[in-house]
Image: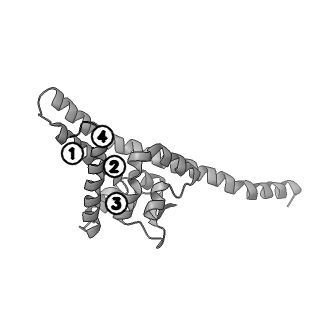
Amino acid sequence: MTDSNKNFNILMDKETPKITNVNSRIFRVLSMLLDHFIMIFIIVPPLIMLIILGEIGILKISDMTFYVVFFSMIFIYINKDFINAKSPAKRILGYQVINLKTGKPANELQCFVRNLTICVAWPLEVIIGFINPERRIGDFIANTKVVISEKEKLKSIWTDLKSITLKLNFIGILIIGVIYFYGLSLILPNMN
């Protein structure tokens, strides 16, 4: 091996972890942003349609009905990791949320709890996700982390969705969700 090849190999051994770390940070933040755009694409059109139908008089919508629909959409956003601990973007980019203690996919309740911080600290979560691609604030609360996983097509959501059965976690998530959103409704003006 020539001196230039040795120098190149030494340089690559030193620089590859830095490049890999930067790429994992960028891909992790891209995953968060892609999830955000996908979920907004799912949530915003029904809300806009509801507002338009209410404004033109086709539907008579009270403020409370609108808030119930709005918070239901936010509930869907928060539960984006619900199916096999992978959100749509995590499936596309090859990530999965795992339980920190067991190393297995996080359960539905852990995925729900880790995403509760998104409603109040989304920009901060993105910054933390860039600093620490494996764990953001919600992961510390839920005792989870994000790891590299097999990439999947979005169609896999339907396959996984068909195999879901009612679990005790689902009831817990609904109860926590109602309490959480009721608390948020007390903070928002003009809801009562």
Answer with mark 1 or mark 2, whichever residue precedes in sequence: 1
Q: Is residue 79 visible?
A: yes
Answer few, some or many: residues within 10 Å of disc 3's Cα (few below 14, many 20 plus, some between 14 and 19).
Answer: many
Mark 1 = which residue?
Answer: 68
Q: Position of residue 163 (x, y in %)?
A: 27, 66
Answer with mark 2 or mark 3, whichever residue precedes in sequence: 2
Foreground disc of the pair 2, 4: 4
Answer with mark 1 or mark 4, whichever residue precedes in sequence: 1
Identify the amino acid type marked 1.
Answer: Val
Mark 2 = which residue?
Answer: 77
Q: Nearer the viewer, residue 44 or 1?
A: 44
Q: Circle 2 sits in a helix, a strand or a loop, which is it?
A: helix
Mark 3 = which residue?
Answer: 83
Q: Where does the N terminus fall, quadrant-wise?
A: bottom right
Mark 4 = which residue?
Answer: 188
Q: Circle 4 sits in a helix, a strand or a loop, which is it?
A: loop
Foreground disc of the pair 2, 3: 2
- Asked if the residue under mark 4 is in contact with the one under mark 2, i.e. CB atoms within 8 Å, the reply is no
- Asked if the residue under mark 3 is in contact with the one under mark 1, i.e. CB atoms within 8 Å, the reply is no
Identify the amino acid type marked 2.
Answer: Tyr
Answer with mark 4 or mark 3, whichever residue precedes in sequence: 3
Foreground disc of the pair 1, 4: 4
- Disc 1 from disc 4: Cα separation: 13 Å
Q: Residue at x 44, y 54 (%)?
A: 90
